[in-house]
Amino acid sequence: MSVELLTLLFFGSLLVFVLLGTPLAFVLGGISVVFLYFEMGSIGFYLLASKMWESMSNPTLMAIPLFVYMAILLEKSGVANDLYDMMHVWWGGLRGGLAIGTVLICVIFAAMSGISGAAVVTMGTIALPKMLERGYDKKMALGAINAGGGWGILIPPSILMVLYSLLTEVSVGRLFAAGIGPGLTLFVLVSIYIGVRCWLQPEMGPALPKEEREGWGAKLRSLRAVILPIGIVAFVLGSIFGGFATPTEAAAIGVFGSLIATAVNGRLTWPVLHEAAIATIRLTALVMWILFAAHAFSTAYTALGAQSLIQDLMSFIPGGKWGSLIFMLLVLFIFGMVLDPVGIMLITLPVFLPVVNAYGFDPIWFGILFIIMMEVGYMTPPFGFNLFYLKGVAPPGVTMGDIYSSVIPYVLVTLLGVALIILFPAIALYLPGVFFSR
């Protein structure tokens, strides 16, 4: 059977079972194993088992449950409430200040947690009702939380970056360092958009009345709220970039810091620890099946000879390597509307990475572009995860239509950030060169 027909059957079968609603990890793993057996025979199973053993013995994998446990504990510790009170004092007197402050909290939360949903649920619960009470435009407030919440997978530590590192064999430390510049760039772009929009249209984000603004004494006292979060971020990222700890060891430091933060806020109870542990075990088991499916898919994909076929097809895309890059980002954008980021990673990375390497693109730089497009996927209709997280905690007057329409300007601002990173790769690659040049 020709490689063209095999590829058509392979991806056609994948599409059929995905549309039937079968979990993607089982679809990818099951179809890949079937095609692998008919192409290579029983030796394909031994090849797959050896790859799984090699992956499971990778110490970086331990960082995933540790970072997840850290994120869940921080979500339950009450740190977010203190951060919001601080932000309200400092930023409330500016037009759009509450929205910009909420986005800033999302940055801090992203640097502590490593997952996307934590900041969306927390800010949707705490900040959204307060902004609506203060007369903020509904779509302005919803979009700010949606955009900022997605940075949990971009600003290190990031669970998705760890998975990307495991699947592509790039340095997770370099990937973490590369996420800082783009994350801050997106924060600046979103803040500029909110500030300019609210300056031109004051009714979008009115400032607090002068009689409700706090003095410098209250502002300085409120800064105590950032001591624990900044300390956790400094210990986790500083230990990695300073060369004192591996990402796995740094994740353990983060768990210890989150336990301290939970205890300081009086939330360190057995039910909290138990609930966080159960959620962590569930996600870790899911990651195991994801890795199995990824290895099965990449092994079968290579065995079928589809890799060379896809590379040949990509060469017909106009615009050379830049045309191919734009095409890959467009595919990621479309997939992000209907699939979860991990599923997109499983399907596209075996296809895209050979093309990325063939054109000489830096895999760290491409990884950052990939992660940002996954972030866009979190916030784009119809199936963006953040949209449903936010609907679950939003006040009764907020409809799904409000949430869908609120993301449009923020998606455009994020895509502007992608364009800047493509034009100026140093935004992503400068810090990895500084921290890991030795």
Image (cartoon, helix red, strand yellow):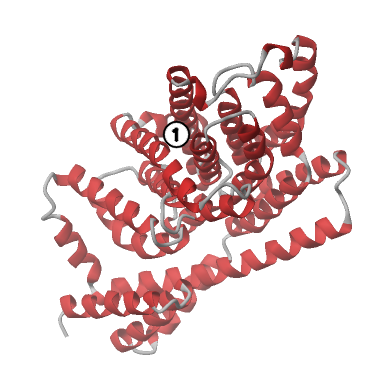
Which residue occupies 52% across, 51% down? 399
Q: Residues within 10 Å of mark 1 (few under 14, many from 20)?
A: many
Q: Residue furthest front?
A: 397
Question: Is 190 above or below relative to 11?
Answer: above
- Amino acid type indicated by mark 1: Pro
Which percent across, then down, holds residue 293?
45, 72
- Left or right of 276, for residue 410: left
Q: In this image, 253 relative to 186: left or right?
A: right
Disc tally is 1
Placement of the N terminus among the 4 image quadrants: bottom left
- Above-or-below relation of 204 to 275: above
The answer to whether one can see residue 305 in this image is: yes
User: Is the residue 359 above or below the residue 139 in the image?
Assistant: below
Specify whether residue 246 is in view: no
Q: Which residue is mark 1?
A: 182
Q: Residue 96 is drawn in which quadrant?
A: top right
Spot occupied by residue 46 in the image (x, y as percentages of width and height): 44, 82
Q: Position of residue 149 (x, y in %)?
A: 55, 43
Q: Quadrant of residue 88?
A: top right
Q: Residue at x 63, y 16 (%)?
A: 93
Res 60 → quadrant: bottom right
Residue 225 x/y as whole percent: 76, 28
Secondary structure category for the residue under label 1 = helix
Residue 354, placed above or below residue 149? below
